[in-house]
Amino acid sequence: MGIFFDQQAVMGSGKHRQLLVALGASLFATGAWAQTLTPDMGTPELKMPAIPSINEYANPKAPANKPLANEAELVMSAKLAENGENIGRGLVWRVFSPEPDADGKLRLLATSKGGTTAFNLEPGSYLVHVAFGRAGATKRITMTRAKRNETMILDAGGVKLNAVLSGGGRIPQDQLRFSIYEDHEDSTGERALIIPDVKPESVVRLNAGTYQIVSNYGTANAVIRADIRVEAGKITEANVEHRAAQLTMKLVRETGGEALADTAWSVLTTSGDIVRESVGAFASIVLAEGEYIIIAKNKDKIYQRDFKVVAGRNQDVEVVATDGASAASTPNQPAGGDEPLD
């Protein structure tokens, strides 16, 4: 890269010459390069800075840069079950000191990811932990000066979860989520949550055992609970059935009319428990089958309707506003051609 000066500017006023002298001094002071101007003030002659000598490339695997390279090697592999194949990927290995530090925690000495792996360890005792998804195992290993091979049995499997509507109807996957809990209750009667927000059709790796799964269709009361058994070395597919339906509610002045904006909605059970509240011209909700009271409030007027949810039957539900009513119940109008609800 070169720097060029305009000859007329250089030979101009004293002010210009002072500026150029200051600029040259500044560039020279940075040490970025040294330059000598030719007598005709043309292109400067650049002098490259001296490059310090560079040491020879250091191999990171050389003993000097890998102090434990000459120590005994511990080769670790893992299986889901005793008679299974070695797991080739997805494992996370951690090696800990067996003695806790001053803060009471075990010191992490080494980690590795993938399948079968190897560690160079000094003679002594170690705790080796392997994780495969939510499944895991820990083993104490004592190293000598000899190479050692160890295989850890995870005693784990997997579970794939899904759900359908009553009658085999399909549930949109973006409205379906699962949670996995321990199978036993604690002293307070609660089950410990293991994995929340599991997407349908995804495989979750777990230690063999019994678990409780909770399936949520929508965000209201369409909830199904079931116990599943995970077996070592196998994928368990669990499908639950939701007896529910999706309703889209609107307040209209007459049957088949336009939805009224700025409507506040409340859905209650027949015993008066609130299931869901929302605001808008249209209110969409997934409800478990059963009987409900739908309440719509618009401009300080309240209207309501009793409604029965039939499993697997998605419907548009109209609440017809009664003119002049401050608090009124509409007749049991049929929804979507159904018979009147008594």
Image (cartoon, rainbow, N blue to C red):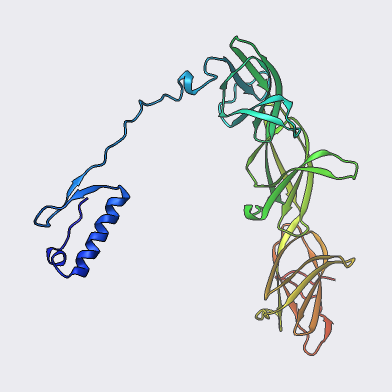
For this view, does 258 lie left or right of residue 334? Answer: left
Q: Position of residue 94 (x, y in %)?
A: 64, 28
Seen at 76% across and 73% down, the residue is 265
Quarter-of-image position of residue 275: bottom right
For this view, does 43 lie left or right of residue 268? Answer: left
Q: Is residue 301 above or below residue 43?
A: below
Kindly tell me whether residue 167 is visible in this rendering: no
Seen at 19% across and 69% down, the residue is 14
Numbered label tally: 0
Q: Position of residue 233 (x, y in %)?
A: 67, 26
Along the line of sight, which residue is nearer the eye, 182 or 226? 182
Q: Is residue 42 above or below residue 232?
A: below
Which residue extends farthest left? 40
For this view, does 29 lie left or right of residue 232? Answer: left
Q: Position of residue 79 (x, y in %)?
A: 64, 23
Q: Position of residue 291 (x, y in %)?
A: 83, 64
Seen at 77% across and 53% down, the residue is 223
Quarter-of-image position of residue 90: top right
Q: Is residue 37 above or below residue 254?
A: above
Seen at 68% across and 35% down, the residue is 134
Kindly tell me whether residue 95 is visible in this rendering: yes
